[in-house]
Amino acid sequence: MKRLLIAAILCLNLSVATAQSNLHFGLKAAPSLAWLKTDSKDFESNGSKFGFSYGLITDFNFADNYAFSTGLDITYRGGKLKSATSIDTGGTTTTTTVSSTFNLQFIEIPITLKLKTNEIGYLTYFLQFGVAPGVNIRARGDSDVRIQTGSVTNSSSTEGEDIKKEINNVNLSMIIGGGVEYTLSGSTVMLAGIQFNNGFLDVFDASALKSNSNYIALTVGVLF
């Protein structure tokens, strides 16, 4: 009986040690290029903006070449949109052009599968895909309004306006990416990669404007 108990304890300790050796935590940062894609009739994409994200990484290696990867990210993203409308009254045309820049901040929990090669020297290459549900925590907007009536033009602008009520509270994105891991020593690994984040859900909580948030990021990080 005593031998069975000792054997069970040894097996449990071995299982815990194995699980711990397969579980890695780390930090990452990722500069990005973000844009808004819209199919709305009266709006068009008007360029991209620089963004940034940072957060925590958790990798669980459940097989030699496979890992479940998750974490917690703070992402700064957004984009630029433009709309133009014209009204003809009594032979005079009034054209209103609105150029808007949206600065959005989300908390995201990426849920991905990482496919890895065998280690080549100190390098391991990987592909990664999955989804990232997120919650909007901040939204600001800048706008430039130009009204032209005949030869007369009037302009106005606003900066840093709180537009959180106009933004959907939740977002869901598809993640596709790849990169390389470099083993420094033991279980410490540096990583670098590129990631495409494609939004599935409408960013705006309005029926007149439909738009998705996308970005491409260059990720650097470290796992322990």
Image (spheres, rainbow, N blue to C red):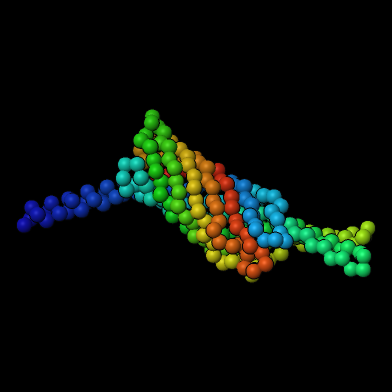
| Left or right of 76, for residue 176 | left
| Left or right of 1, for residue 93 | right
Assign the N terminus to one quadrant of the image. Answer: bottom left
Quarter of the image for residue 182 reads top left
Tell me which residue sits at (88%, 60%) in the image. 148
Q: Position of residue 24 (x, y in %)?
A: 38, 47
Quarter of the image for residue 9 reads bottom left
Q: From this viewpoint, which residue is outermost toward the front?
A: 91
* Number of marks in picture: 0
Tell me which residue sits at (49%, 60%) in the image. 133
| Left or right of 60, for residue 133 | right
| Left or right of 5, for residue 105 | right
- Is residue 124 depicted above or below 26 in this figure? above
Q: Position of residue 107 (x, y in %)?
A: 53, 59
Tell me which residue sits at (20%, 53%) in the image. 12
- Is residue 193 depicted above or below 112 in this figure? above
Taking depth in this image into account, of 70 and 45 the one nearest to the observer is 45
Assign the C terminus to one quadrant of the image. Answer: top left
Tell me which residue sits at (39%, 43%) in the image. 115
Using the rendered image of the protein, determine whether residue 151 is visible from the camera's viewpoint.
yes
Q: From this viewpoint, which residue is outermost toward the top?
A: 121
Q: Position of residue 14 (x, y in %)?
A: 22, 48
Taking depth in this image into account, of 65 and 84 the one nearest to the observer is 84
- Is residue 27 depicted above or below 123 in this figure? below
Q: Position of residue 134 (x, y in %)?
A: 52, 61
Q: From this viewpoint, which residue is outermost toward the left?
A: 1
Using the rendered image of the protein, determine whether residue 52 is visible from the camera's viewpoint.
no
Taking depth in this image into account, of 14 and 125 the one nearest to the observer is 125
